[in-house]
Image (cartoon, rainbow, N blue to C red):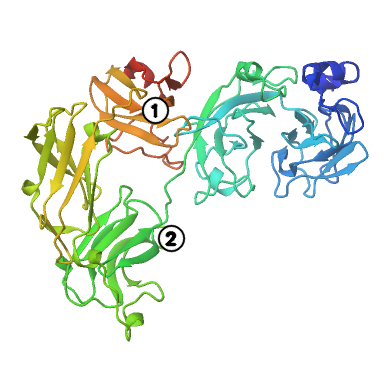
Amino acid sequence: MKKFIPLILAVAAVLGPLLFAPSCANTTESPTGGKKDTIPPYITDIVPLPGSTGVPVKGATITFTFNEYVVVKEPRNIFLSPPQVKAPKHRLKGKNLVVYFEDNLDSNTTYTLTFTDAIADNNEGNKFPGYTYVFSTGSRIDSMMITGTVENCNTLNPVKGATVLLYRDLTDSAVFLRRPYAAVKTDDWGFFALPFIADTSYRLYAIKDENNNNIYDPDTELIGFVSDTIKPVLVAHDTIKEMLKYDMKDTLSCLERKSEYEIRLFREKPAKQHVVNKVRTADRAGYITFMAPNAWIDSLWIKGYKPDRTISQFNILNDSLEVWLNDRGPVPDTLKLMVNYRKTDSLGRLKAVLEQINLQYPEGKSKSSNRGRRREISHEDTICVMKLSADPKTVEQVGFDLMFNYPIINEKFDSLVFRYVNPRQKEFTGKFSVERDSLNLRHYSIIPGEQLLPGYDYYLKVPQGAFRDINGFYCDSVEVKVTLPKDEKLGSIECEMTGVDRKVIVELLDEKCTKVQRKYIITKDCTLRFPYLNKGKYCLRLTEDRNENSFVDTGSVLERRQPEKVVFYKLNGDKYIEVLEGAEMVQTVNVGELIK
């Protein structure tokens, strides 16, 4: 059994202070005048010993003795594998931490008890680096192990605290229905090691377990999985680097650990279909939201009006539907929207139903609530409301932005005037094209027909009466001016995209990978320009658009389908591209090498 005693137990009594000597450089004085304690606690004894067999299934307790008094900061991070319905319990007695179990253990089973960010010393809060303890209720200890890393599918950042689930049941539904054969939590680097498991075939999953029940809840939790069944090849031993517990700031040691499997967490599309929300947004407008994407609508109309008087539009996921009434007569307080769609029944099947959805004004805002007092009418209540804008940093790529509050029923785009003035104040009239957003019938882009130049002023004018909306109102006149940025501190990135043999979504993101600065969709070799960038770090993300819908699609557990593959271009091994003031960077991106 001594082979299961970790290295820290063998040397702690003699070398404990020396192991943490580098962290003692802090000379901050404590209230007593001595040096501040910066040494984490360590274990001096365990009963029963690690690797014990024949542990009773009922009433088992494990006592960990530390070199000093400790506290349990995160009880949920005292983690038992295989997990039980009830998590392990603990009590502190002097310098002892006693762990016990409310549920009976299974017979002839190898268990591991893992501490991750759970324990700290009582005085200074120095965290115990962690430990994995193994014991068996049978006559032997299973000896195999697997390792891996869990990442977010969109940012590829490591996911701390994800629960990795290992199943001997190879059916796809097991992760939805029962607790796993073995489980473990990921560390700060998203790394995990599942040691002391049997030599057999498994299914491997990871979830962000919001309710800590070790079972996947598709409505609220992220999930990832390894597509094929796996079989362990590594032998578990407490002295190999994959089993050791490191300071998470020790980058070199953490990255040296072998990761066999890469799991990317994603959010599945909900499977049950029904209407979950409804909102009346204006006299002649509202929207409804569905539980799942790709809602299947056979027909819809507003009761009391001809079907052709109803205008509707889905969002990109087809799970939210905007509705407008194209009728200028009196409008009731409640619009009765009739929707004939496919709804999930009690057996999980899609069945055609006709549902009446009442779109009412919010309380206190209905027309009837305004009776008896004069309604204040603003200018916007009598015109076709629109917004015309242009971003100097992106106008070359996306043009001028034209957005209407309501769908338009009469349009005169040929009456728009695009003109520009050169540095000598000479004026010219330019050509333009119009692109309607395929996902938003109220949104248009006005694209200049020629290359924009620094030092020129560009104007786009919409004359009065050029557009009429479903309310019967005409637009006012509006003009927008835009000039390309002249700030010499702004930088740029030019990317020569090579080896492009498929449809790829290319996005320039901020340093946190949360905001898209620029976006292109490419299908062949080309050069992409990202001008007018502020000083800072950026990421270039490439997504393989497998189904060519120009949208990043998620995965499915039951269909064994991974989310669309995301990669980041790395400059000298770093996914961050640092743009200095005024820098003009040129990069060659081999798409074929990145997306294999």
Q: Kindly give the residue lying farthest to the bottom in the view shown.
A: 372
Q: Kindly give the residue lying farthest to the front in the view shown.
A: 424
- Mark 2 secondary-structure assignment: loop
Q: Is residue 403 visible?
A: yes
Q: Are marks 2 and 1 in contact (CB under 8 Å)?
A: no
Compared across the picture, whether 563 is left or right of 314 comes to: right
From the image, which quarter does the C terminus lie in?
Answer: top left
Above or below, comparing residue 401 to residue 358 in the picture = above
Q: Position of residue 505 (x, y in %)?
A: 31, 31
Say which amino acid is labelled 2: Leu
**Residue at horizontal 24 percent and vertical 67 percent from the top:** 381
Q: Position of residue 118 (x, y in %)?
A: 75, 37
Query: Looking at the image, which is closer to me, 214 or 59?
Result: 214
Which residue position is annotated with label 1? 534
Q: Position of residue 284 (x, y in %)?
A: 25, 68
Above or below, comparing residue 76 to residue 477 in the picture = above
* N-terminal label among 2 and 1: 2
Which residue position is annotated with label 2? 347
- Mark 1 secondary-structure assignment: loop
Mark 2 vs mark 1: give the one in front.
1
Say which amino acid is labelled 1: Asn
Report crowding for label 2: few under 14, some 14 to 19, many 20 or more residues within 10 A (C-alpha): few
**Residue at horizontal 27 percent and vertical 25 percent from the top:** 502
Compared across the picture, whether 414 is left or right of 396 comes to: left
